[in-house]
Image: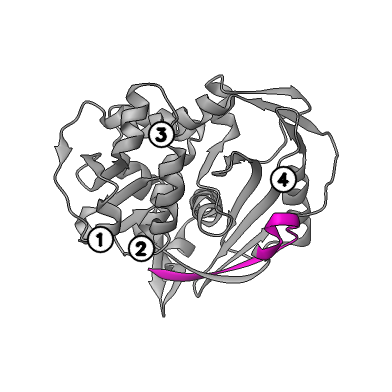
Amino acid sequence: MGQVTVIVSGFTGHFQGFNGNHTLNITNTDIARGIITIGKTHWLQYFKNPMEILNDLVHHFTGLSTFVTTTNGQLCITARFRNLDASDQRIKSYNIGMGIAKIVADKVLNIPYLQHVDYLIDEGIATITAGSKQRGDLAGKDLLGNWHILEAKGSSYSFSDYQLRGAKQQATRVISIDGSAPNTSSYCCTTINESDTTIYLADPDDDNINPIRLTIDSDKFLLSYYNKLYSKFATTEEVDIDIGYPQIENYRPIYYRLTETFVVGMLSSIIENLRGNSVRFLDTISAFSEVAKTFESNYISIGGDGIILIEENLR
């Protein structure tokens, strides 16, 4: 478990209170959970290929166990990361940054639902009704039903002003979702180096160059968020696990073995609703998300969305 610094700026209205510096504890298991819930298209290609298991996906392809560690209490990259060629460093930094952005959105902005817009478009859940394809990576939904747009970037070097301007333009390019402006349009730029991790989370002023309008089916958005995982283990045998935290177990999570290394859990109320193609679980999630914020572990990652990821080889 390593500390990261989140520098938050530019948020207004109901979100103004988030501005300032935050310190979070983030683990490799957290980043893995972030990656597998976002749903970017190339991750699903790995899911659909029976020769690739999730363990390969989050550890070999992303390099979490080899290239991300904790040093002096700080989340940072390992010396082996710098031995990669520049293109591999960029790919791994991008994926690590994407996973961290998912965790930061949940822990700092209280946005538990975040999915890649490309995935939503490919699945017929979202459509671009105007504008270009150059826009924020991720569409999010909070527990009040508000929409959010987030552009995620990761690097092992500091971001230049030029890169931050580009992130700003992408984040603010979506000017409406279902006819209304997103509540926030932010960028989350993660710099992870050999000594520490700094995350810049900002909701900049609008930059309406080539504006984009999206339509997203709200119920399908929520169902797809969970079904990406649930469809992988729906027919597998349940695993009997007690994580030793009664406040979580009171919500009756059901655990399934996803790979030899990973066990995934999901609240029983969510699973019951998925089986009925219903999204009547938001009240439960709202209460659970507050409990999840109090839990920390090096090998168990619990999100405000009611998804639990356990890395058993660390137990």
Mark 3 highlights which residue?
A: 226
- Indicate yes or no whether the magenta region holds residue 13: yes
Instruction: Evaluate if marks 2 and 3 touch, with contact meaning CB atoms under 8 Å apart.
Output: no
Q: CA–CA distance between discs 4 and 3?
A: 25 Å
Does residue 220 lie above or below 267 as drawn? above
Q: Determine the image quadrant of residue 172.
A: top right
Does residue 150 lie above or below 199 as drawn? above
The amino acid sitting under disc 4 is Ala
Instruction: Evaluate if marks 1 and 3 touch, with contact meaning CB atoms under 8 Å apart.
Output: no
Labels 2 and 3: the sequence-earlier one: 3
Q: CA–CA distance between discs 4 and 2?
A: 31 Å
Labels 4 and 2: the sequence-earlier one: 4
Image quadrant occupied by the C terminus? bottom left
Q: Is residue 177 visible?
A: yes
**In the rendered structure, which segment of residues is drawn in magenta?**
1-17
Please name the colour scheme applied to the rendered image: one colour
- Indicate yes or no whether the magenta region holds residue 67: no
Instruction: Evaluate if marks 1 and 4 touch, with contact meaning CB atoms under 8 Å apart.
Output: no
Residue 245, numbered label: 1
Q: Residue at 65% across / 43% down in the picture?
A: 148
Q: CA–CA distance between discs 2 and 1?
A: 8 Å
The amino acid sitting under disc 2 is Phe
Labels 4 and 3: the sequence-earlier one: 4
Residue 295, numbered label: 2
Q: Residue at 35% across / 55% down in the picture?
A: 301
173 or 250: nearer the eye?
250
The amino acid sitting under disc 3 is Tyr
Residue 311, numbered label: none
Residue density around tag 1, few if under 14, some if 14–19, many if 20 or more, within 10 Å: few
